[in-house]
Image (spheres, rainbow, N blue to C red):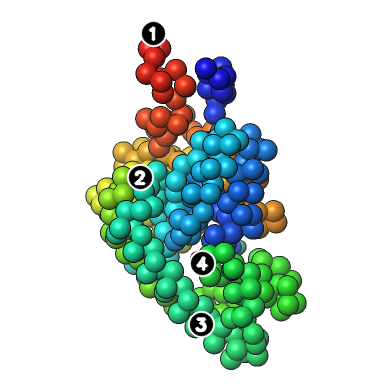
Amino acid sequence: MSLTANTLNVALTIDLHSHSNISDGLLTPVELVEHAAKHHVNVLALTDHDDTGGLGIAEIEAKRLGLQLIKGVEISVTWKKRTIHIVGLKIDPEHPPLKSGLAAIRAGRHVRAAGMAAGLDKVGIMGSLEGAYQYAQEGIISRTHFARFLVNSGVAKDNKAVFKNYLVKGKPGYFEHQWASLEDAVSWIVGSGGMAVIAHPGRYDLGRTNMLLLLEEFRALGGEAIEVVTGSHTVDQYLEFAKYAHQFGLKSSQGSDYHGKGISFMEMGRLPALPSNCIPVWQNWVETKSPAVKSGESLQ
Ligand code: AMP
Ligand code: MN
Ligand code: MN
Ligand code: MN
């Protein structure tokens, strides 16, 4: 039996939210897994936006390096006219409704990209569609790819300025878009055998009443957990969402939401532990048990 961190009863480093260049991350799936290994991550979920195309190759690399790869996805959802993100963990990417649902979202992204570019054309910023696609060769087209074009062509000084001045509501590169429904996203994930998790809830400008409604509806649809510790939450938000999780009987997840150097809130392998009153979403996962349990041996 090989000695892993958990055999020695050392806490595992678990990161359940990350992106490769199949969506808007900078690293290839293989490079991402290598990066995670370098930062001592033991259990990693690859959760590309609306695309599962990196999971196969990531899993092979993870096996090679002795990491546990959790198959994931981050689905774009429109709920009450707002965009929210639902992470699926332990999904089966071949589940037909999930596969076709994600394909439809990706098709919608092309339409939206054309609309965003038309808006930028109108204010004299030309060539953004071709420019953005140049950065999106491996998979989906996203606002991040437009951001790269706008920064690299000197229109905006950095990513932050782009999102503030160009790609959000009321700005020239914003294009209203309808993503999947919450009901569909959760049912695709759960139907594929996975667990649905509300990504970075602290980033939605919902107000308390709508947050409560979202949590209620999400749980009723079969949602399992919310991200309590994520790269974009403050320490206060860890505690706030731990409370919500407890109140709604939801489990808690943690993930860096790593996208690559310079465009991530947090480096991999640096997440603090979940607050102690949280039930981890990985509580019963075989990937977080010691090899002795996996091979069926008794722990008594
Ligand atoms: P999209 O799904 O095409 O709307 O793109 C959303 C992605 O843009 C997110 O997943 C982030 O990676 C990135 N993003 C959104 N808002 C910001 C922001 N304010 N600053 C930097 N990146 C952002
Ligand atoms: Mn992203
Ligand atoms: Mn997200
Ligand atoms: Mn993400």
The image shows residue 2 at horizontal and vertical percentages of 55, 20
Residue to which mark 4 is pinned:
140
Marked residue nearer the N-terminal end (3 or 2): 3
Q: In the displayed orientation, state which residue is furthest to the left.
A: 220
The answer to whether residue 244 shows anywhere in this view is no
Per the model, the C-alpha gap separating discs 1 and 3 is: 61 Å
The image shows residue 60 at horizontal and vertical percentages of 53, 43
Per the model, the C-alpha gap separating discs 1 and 4 is: 49 Å
Marked residue nearer the N-terminal end (1 or 4): 4
Question: Count of labels shown?
Answer: 4
Residue to which mark 2 is pinned:
195
Per the model, the C-alpha gap separating discs 3 and 2 is: 33 Å
Q: Which residue corresponds to the image point at 63% horizontal and 34% vertical from the top-left?
A: 40
> Dot 3 surroundings within 10 Å: few (below 14), some, or many (20 or more)?
some
Q: Is mark 3 within 8 Å of ligand 1?
A: no
> Mark 1: which secondary structure?
loop
Residue to which mark 1 is pinned:
300
Marked residue nearer the N-terminal end (2 or 1): 2
Per the model, the C-alpha gap separating discs 2 and 1 is: 30 Å
Q: Is mark 4 within 8 Å of ligand 1?
A: yes
> Mark 2: which secondary structure?
strand
Amino acid at pointer 4: Ile
Nearer the observer: mark 4 or 2; the answer is 4
Residue to which mark 3 is pinned:
114
Circles 1, 3 touching at the beta carbon (< 8 Å): no
